[in-house]
Amino acid sequence: MLLDTTARTTEEMGALGARLAAVLRAGDLVVLTGPLGAGKTTMTRGLGAALGARGQVSSPTFVLARTHPTTAGPDLVHVDAYRLSDPVELDDLDLDWDASIVVVEWGRGFVDGISDSILDVEIVRATGAGEAPAPDDLDPDDVPDEPRRVVVTATGPRWDGVAL
Ligand SMILES: Nc1ncnc2c1ncn2[C@@H]1O[C@H](COP(=O)(O)OP(=O)(O)OP(=O)(O)O)[C@@H](O)[C@H]1O
Ligand SMILES: [Mg+2]
């Protein structure tokens, strides 16, 4: 395991994304796991900002993948696998995996075989009272801060000896 920490606020989750960005390079694959509203996009936004990603990093509702050129060099490809039913559909996107930093929300089980090295990020919402569903009329951009546990695990040779 590379990291087991808590992001107490939206800002802290973004900062964690930036921390990941500092070690990322072309060819890297990051998989984000966690329930709806866990903070996957929030983390990707911080990651993108740190890479100097052009364009808005948001939940890609109608597109499966969005490519952001970055000032850091490699494109940031942000994939939302939520609606994918089959891992081969990821293949169909024809992404330039080797030249890009690819971040896949809901990617677990969809990226097997794509790369021998994966940075797996699990975001766990706090249990207890905070787990109650938010009211329907709550502005999605106005969700109160609530701590998230973030566990980063690396698999594959790419991550040998890499520290966050
Ligand atoms: N500690 C925290 N870390 C991250 N986000 C937080 C935290 N506390 C509150 N939030 C809020 O929770 C929401 C997380 O939404 P976000 O879109 O990032 O989740 P997601 O995991 O991408 O959801 P989805 O599965 O729908 O794509 C944001 O509104 C964010 O402001
Ligand atoms: Mg999202």
Image: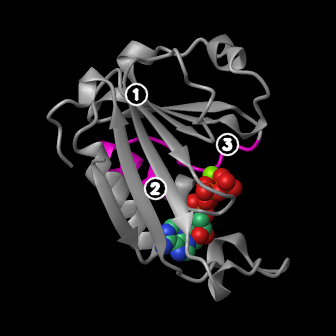
Q: CA distance from mark 1 to mark 3?
A: 16 Å
Q: Residue at x 78, y 36 (%)?
A: 83
Q: Residue at x 53, y 80 (%)?
A: 146
Q: CA distance from mark 2 to mark 3?
A: 14 Å
Q: Is mark 2 within 8 Å of ligand 1?
A: yes
If you read the primary sequence from the N terminus, does the residue marked by circle 1 or circle 3 appear first? Answer: 3
10 Å crowding of disc 3: few (<14), some (14-19), many (20+): some
Please name which of the two marks, 1 or 2, marks the residue nearer to the observer. 2
In the image, farthest residue toward the bottom: 129
| Kind of residue at badge 1 | Asp
| Kind of residue at badge 3 | Pro
Please name which of the two marks, 2 or 3, marks the residue nearer to the observer. 2
10 Å crowding of disc 1: few (<14), some (14-19), many (20+): many
Q: Nearer the viewer, residue 89 or 61?
A: 89
Q: Nearer the viewer, residue 127 or 57?
A: 127
Residue 159 image position (x, y, % from top left): 25, 31
Q: Is mark 3 within 8 Å of ligand 2?
A: no
| Kind of residue at badge 2 | Met
**Magenta-highlighted residues:** 43-61
Which residue is the site of mark 2? 43
Q: Is residue 16 magenta?
A: no
Q: Is residue 49 magenta?
A: yes
Q: Nearer the viewer, residue 12 or 34?
A: 34
Q: Tell me, yes or no, whether the two marked residues, 1 and 3, touch with CB atoms within 8 Å.
A: no
Residue 73 image position (x, y, % from top left): 28, 28
Which residue is the site of mark 3? 60
